[in-house]
């Protein structure tokens, strides 16, 4: 919660639910990352929040960009990033999209299997590729599946294949899981990465880079370690596994860069009970799972919620969105404590919503407009 | 799959994933409902697919419309429905939205608690209200939570409150769960509704209407009972519980009206394994959970998928979408059988996708465009 956001909401009084992002917080986050990991290039994960103002600020601060699609590449270019500061970081790409990226000057691609290497070799000849490896993600709040990456043993073959096809076998990437609370989570994956570096070196292929991925948390309800703790834990793990041959490194923060820069303003639409005996109230907001709060899926991410009654007694609520979809419930298995004095029409502020909200929003489910966004 | 859709895809060759809806199928579904439930008014659930062409066709056939928001009310009006053919069926409404609906001539509102009745009484004086009651939803594939409705005992008080505030206590509604496979599922809720009718009649309040909701299934992988079986089971239950005083009835089909009218055309982007030993392939499509297939959540809805290799041997796959989101996996707990000859670049047709797809689509997650839609 920043004074600038409060001031914006008080003066502009926007109608309907909206996200307000404070660029000063984004700037501070960027500088903290740069300071905590001084030898690491920062590739902002555009998908977290692709607002042009955010991309422009980060480009001006010197950030590079991790893009998931050609559309995101175009956004990063439009924000002022040169193609050498852009990575096409999605392991799942149509060959014609790789060609479109190559035409725009993009030379860095993510892969996790041999057929994807073959697509890149055909559509982006000579480009650099890094191979994503699987990683268990223990300690992360937003679970990662096995969707991206391959087993480390297979990565060796994938990178050799790239080398054979005239690509530059450039490095290894992994992702320790989003909203990762354990600063040591990078250690195991870095051990695997170092092993891949050694095996390939024995076969005459010198890798250059480790992509440390994202996972850096933003503060929701629980306290989180500072970014400098992540920096020193990663530094220690790099030295432990790579000795005095530390590779180039990059990170791809998304949530950690913009999460705490945004606040969603919402309104209480209804408070009710299902029977006279019910102990737990249902509180319905004008935003829900399909309006931008998709990360409440399985109740993974618990956002802090501020109301004007925050000093008052609290009682558990089931929190739900405004649509006619019964799956549009935010917190039910673990009810959310809200002030007993909360009333219909009250404004609520949902903190830590700068990442993974606007773009998750449905086009027009139930006729509701997608989440409005103001970047200040 | 209809000849018109196949013909459209073959001649138009639209680029990227898209939904194609055949209006002839929608027409046939409407006529089947009207034939199976001749004494029941049909209120199409606009949220299932609000394409203007669909609404226009249904309006011309005589359908009424169940709307979840003022935007949906405006769509129904634009399609040619008069206000008396529109219900504001969302139990969660801002008071200013009720006022906006009232101004447009809407006189039928859904409620499930006393405070909502008070909003309607202030913003839509004299309107008709029906109270939604809870219903267990057993037998439904898309689970309903306790989000909407109140316990039947409470409904009596809610409707009495409406009567006291000058509204017309008009009836009772319930929803037996979406994609309901049990034709007898309406029986229990109709018993509760009849009990509410009796109790209120004793207190001098005559209810008129039972809103039987939606729940009528569309065919996915499993066979489903025909709409005429639902019609006769409901007719039987009405006679059982209301005797010779059968109330007005309405139904709100959504999925059952448009589900089987639509096909999503998609493309295989990648097929890979995570290790040499993996038995199960990962198949990645250019559409996923955030591009319109949200109802694969918890793997509830299993769509039939056609490929040009359908005669060949099949093997289980994990099916996933194209985004960098690890939650964007369609079927993993129960892998999906697809032909072993399926290749990258192949077109796949996802059947039964006419309902709850386009509007669930994310605005631009990962930079991917929302699902395109063609109504033919």
Image (cartoon, coloured by chain):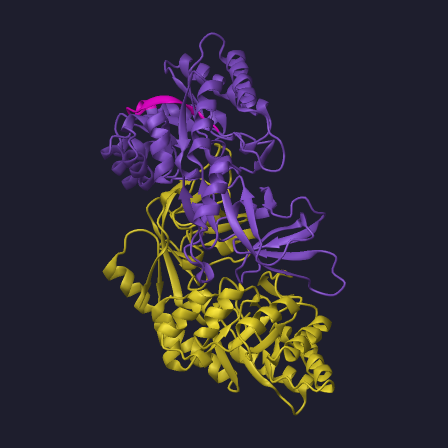
Chain colours: A purple, B yellow
Q: Is residue B43 magenta?
A: no
- Image point (41%, 82%), residue name: B62
Q: How many marks?
A: 0
Whether residue A311 is situated above or below residue A175 in the rendered picture: below
Q: Residue furthest top?
A: A244
Location of residue A66 by image quarter = top left
What residue range appears in magenta? A163-174
Q: Residue furthest bottom?
A: B244
Which sits in the foreground, A81 or B318? A81
Whether residue A323 is situated above or below residue A113 in the rendered picture: below
B291 with respect to A168 (left or right): right
The x and y percentages for residue A79 are 30, 34
Location of residue B19 by image quarter = bottom left
Q: Residue furthest right?
A: A277
- Image point (28%, 29%), residue name: A83
Q: Using the rendered image of the protein, determine whether residue B304 is visible from the camera's viewpoint.
A: no
B320 with respect to B205 (left or right): left
Q: Is residue A166 magenta?
A: yes
The x and y percentages for residue A80 are 28, 31
Which sits in the foreground, A107 or B364? B364
The x and y percentages for residue A3 are 50, 37
Whether residue A151 is situated above or below residue A322 in the rendered picture: above
Q: Using the rendered image of the protein, determine whether residue A261 is visible from the camera's viewpoint.
A: yes
The x and y percentages for residue A318 are 65, 53
In the picture, the quarter occupied by the N terminus of chain B is bottom left
In the picture, the quarter occupied by the C terminus of chain B is bottom left
């Amino acid at each position: 919660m920043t004074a600038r956001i409060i001031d914006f909401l008080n003066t502009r009084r926007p109608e309907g639910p909206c996200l307000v992002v404070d660029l000063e917080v984004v700037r501070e986050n960027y500088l903290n990352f740069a300071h905590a990991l001084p030898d690491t290039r920062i590739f902002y994960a555009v998908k977290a929040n692709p607002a042009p103002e955010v991309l422009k600020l980060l480009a001006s601060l010197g950030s590079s960009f991790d893009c998931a699609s050609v559309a995101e590449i175009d956004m990063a270019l439009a924000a002022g990033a040169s193609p050498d500061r852009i990575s096409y970081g999605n392991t799942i790409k149509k060959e014609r999209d790789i060609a479109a990226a190559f035409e725009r000057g993009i030379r860095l691609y993510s892969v996790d299997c041999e057929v994807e290497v073959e697509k890149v070799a055909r559509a982006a000849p000579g480009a650099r590729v890094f191979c994503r490896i699987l990683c268990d993600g223990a300690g992360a709040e937003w679970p990662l599946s096995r969707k991206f990456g391959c087993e480390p043993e297979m990565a060796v073959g994938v990178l050799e294949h790239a080398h054979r096809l005239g690509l530059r076998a450039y490095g290894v990437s992994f992702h320790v899981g989003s909203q990762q609370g354990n600063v040591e989570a990078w250690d195991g994956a870095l051990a695997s990465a170092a092993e891949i570096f050694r095996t390939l070196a024995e076969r005459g292929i010198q890798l250059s880079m480790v992509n440390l991925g994202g996972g850096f948390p933003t503060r929701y309800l629980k306290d989180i370690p500072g970014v400098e703790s992540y920096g020193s834990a990663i530094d220690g793990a790099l030295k432990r596994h790579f000795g005095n041959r530390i590779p180039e490194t990059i990170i791809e923060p998304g949530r950690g860069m913009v999460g705490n820069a945004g606040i969603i303003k919402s309104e209480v639409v209804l408070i009710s009970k299902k029977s006279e005996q019910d102990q737990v109230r249902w509180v319905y907001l004008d935003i829900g799972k399909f309006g931008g709060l998709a990360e409440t899926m399985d109740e993974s991410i618990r956002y802090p919620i501020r109301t004007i009654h925050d000093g008052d007694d609290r009682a558990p609520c089931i929190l739900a969105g405004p649509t006619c979809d019964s799956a549009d419930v935010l917190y039910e298995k673990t009810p959310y404590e809200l002030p007993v004095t909360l009333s219909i029409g009250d404004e609520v502020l949902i903190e830590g919503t700068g990442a993974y909200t606007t773009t998750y929003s449905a086009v027009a489910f139930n006729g509701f407009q997608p989440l409005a966004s103001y970047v200040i």
